[in-house]
Amino acid sequence: MTDAERRSRASEAFFGRRKGKPLRERQAQHLQTVLPVLKVDLSAPAPADIAALYDFSPARTRLEIGFGGGEHLIRRAQEAPDTAFIGVEPFVNSMAKLIGSVEETGAKNIRLYDDDATALLDWLPAASIDQIDLLYPDPWPKKKHWKRRFVSKVNLDRFARVLKPGGLFCFASDIDTYVNWTLMHCGSHPAFVWTAENAVDWLTPFAGWPGTRYEAKAKREGRKSAYLTFRRL
């Protein structure tokens, strides 16, 4: 990667701080021993078939960007053992928590990436993903920071490249400005169509929705959530 590419990549930092409180000894050990086994290695050429990253032949592949505490990711992975999951989360403490859950449940269908999701999206083979989940992403509420919101023309181009025809982009947020932002950007992108037919569709959680801690916080604070599904044409 050239210096210009590195500067470009740095300008695309859509996440905030990388680490919180000190990790417990076991969590730190997991990051040293388990993460390298599960981590997608972007220094290697991308496989022609994403199934090569797993020890089984998956029926589907899902990518979750910014999985937070990992509650949603681990639940979905347990419910669908024939689906391959890739979880992206740059926040060290969240990654450590998810790896602990993987160890506890014995989930075999999860791979991880602990840095900028755009690098992974650029590495993945074209038309290799069935579904992308972006759930309660950082809303960057101040207008001067809106350019750091993950939903953008350039990232929707990335989504369009890696999603299979008919694949889904699922977005959830409790921040009205970000919901409207996402509808505007996806509505103007030629590769995506919003699947909602009426208001109930986007106010109803996704099928089998286990909820997240961010959603629980929004409810406690009196905010409603929107659940948007866009289909790749």
Image (spheres, helix red, strand yellow):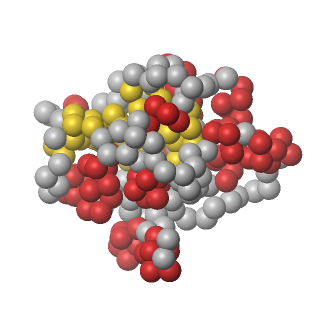
Whether residue 70 is visible: yes
Quadrant of the frame with the C terminus:
top left
The image quadrant of residue 40 is top right
Q: Is residue 65 left or right of residue 195?
A: right
Q: Position of residue 15 (x, y in %)?
A: 51, 62
x, y percentage for residue 230?
23, 41
Give the residue displayed 43% in from the left and 58% down from the top.
118
Q: Percent x, y for residue 195?
A: 18, 36
- The residue positioned 38% from the left and 62% from the top of the image is 149
- Is residue 189 depicted above or below 81 in this figure? below
Q: Residue at x 46, y 70 (%)?
A: 9
For this orientation, the residue located farthest to the right is: 25
Q: Position of residue 188 (x, y in %)?
A: 14, 57
Residue at 46% over, 22% down = 57
The vertical placement of 105 against 24, above or below, is above
Q: Foreground: 60 or 125?
A: 125
Looking at this view, is 106 or 3 the one in front?
3
Relative height, residue 175 to residue 108 (above, below):
below
Rendered image quadrant of residue 128: top left
